[in-house]
Image (spheres, rainbow, N blue to C red):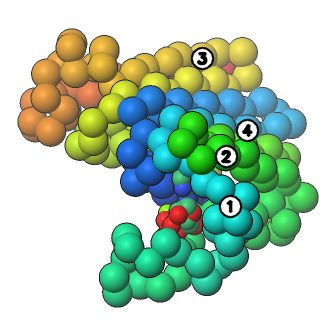
Amino acid sequence: MHATICDMITDLVQNAIEARATEITLEVKETKTNLKFVIADNGKGMSAVVLEKAKDPYYTDGQKHRYRKVGLGLPFLFQTAEMTGGKAAITSKEGEGTTVTFNVDPTNVDLPAFGNFTTAAVALMSYEFEGNLSIERSAQNKSYSVNKNELVEALGNLNELESLTLLKQFIASQEEDLEAL
Ligand SMILES: Nc1ncnc2c1ncn2[C@@H]1O[C@H](COP(=O)(O)OP(=O)(O)O)[C@@H](O)[C@H]1O
Ligand SMILES: [Mg+2]
């Protein structure tokens, strides 16, 4: 398996969607010494018992994947933290929502590759669910933010090829501006 940081982020946002969140925020901030991401949702949340179980690689709620018994999202996050000296944390409250935070030294050799953020963001923004997703992204001292409601207003249905192409161009150009440092 060659999961990237972006795969991990996608998976965690997917969890928020599966928890029926209507507001999801994804923050991805890089500096030379720290890579941070935070996924916050107002979905169904977890009790302390479920939260403890959710960190176990052999736990899944038994409903989502009828043919796969092993959850990957949260355990993979904690394993990666352990391998890299990073810090992963989850806070959750039943009926209120969940926040997942990860901080790591981006130069750590055991860290998976970052992956392609444009691809991940486009996939998440065009994923059909009832709710808003906001992305706040920064690298060094440059930043941009996008949110799904505004994108839909500007581009129309994000599942149509034309809108999707524009969305991809837009996010790619924002990402390029971050890199052009
Ligand atoms: N954001 C979230 N809100 C509510 N419950 C969550 C959230 N993230 C994870 N969970 C719970 O933790 C379990 C394990 O998540 P995960 O490790 O991603 O495995 P999977 O999604 O395959 O079940 C989920 O089945 C769900 O019950
Ligand atoms: Mg999951």
Q: Nearer the viewer, mark 3 or mark 1?
A: 1
Q: Amino acid at mark 1?
A: Leu
User: Crowdedness of circle 3 by 10 Å Cα count: few (<14), some, many (20+)?
Assistant: some
Res. 117 in view: no
Q: Secondary structure at mark 4?
A: strand
Residue located beneath label 1 in the image: 51
**Nearer the N terminus, badge 4 or badge 1?**
4
Q: Which mark is residue 143?
A: 3
Q: Where 52 falls versus 117 (above or below)?
A: below
Image spot of residue 51 (x, y percent)? 68, 61
Front position among marks 2 and 4: 2
Looking at marks 2 and 1 on the same chain, the residue that comes earlier in the sequence is marked by: 1
Q: Image height check: is 156 above or below 160?
A: above
Q: Is disc 1's CB within 8 Å of ligand 1?
A: yes
Q: CA distance from mark 4 to mark 1?
A: 21 Å
Give percent across and percent down for residue 12: 53, 52
Mark 2–mark 1 distance (CA, rounded to whole Å): 7 Å
The residue labelled by disc 2 is 92
Q: Quadrant of residue 35?
A: top right
Is disc 3 in contact with disc 4, using a CB cutoff of under 8 Å? no
| Alpha carbon separation for disc pair 3 and 4 | 14 Å
Q: From the image, which quarter does the N terminus lie in?
A: bottom right
Q: Type of residue at label 4? A: Lys
Who's the residue at 67% across and 46% down the image? 92
Disc 2 is placed on an element classified as strand
Query: Residue 36: which disc?
Result: 4
Q: Earlier in the sequence, mark 3 or mark 1?
A: 1
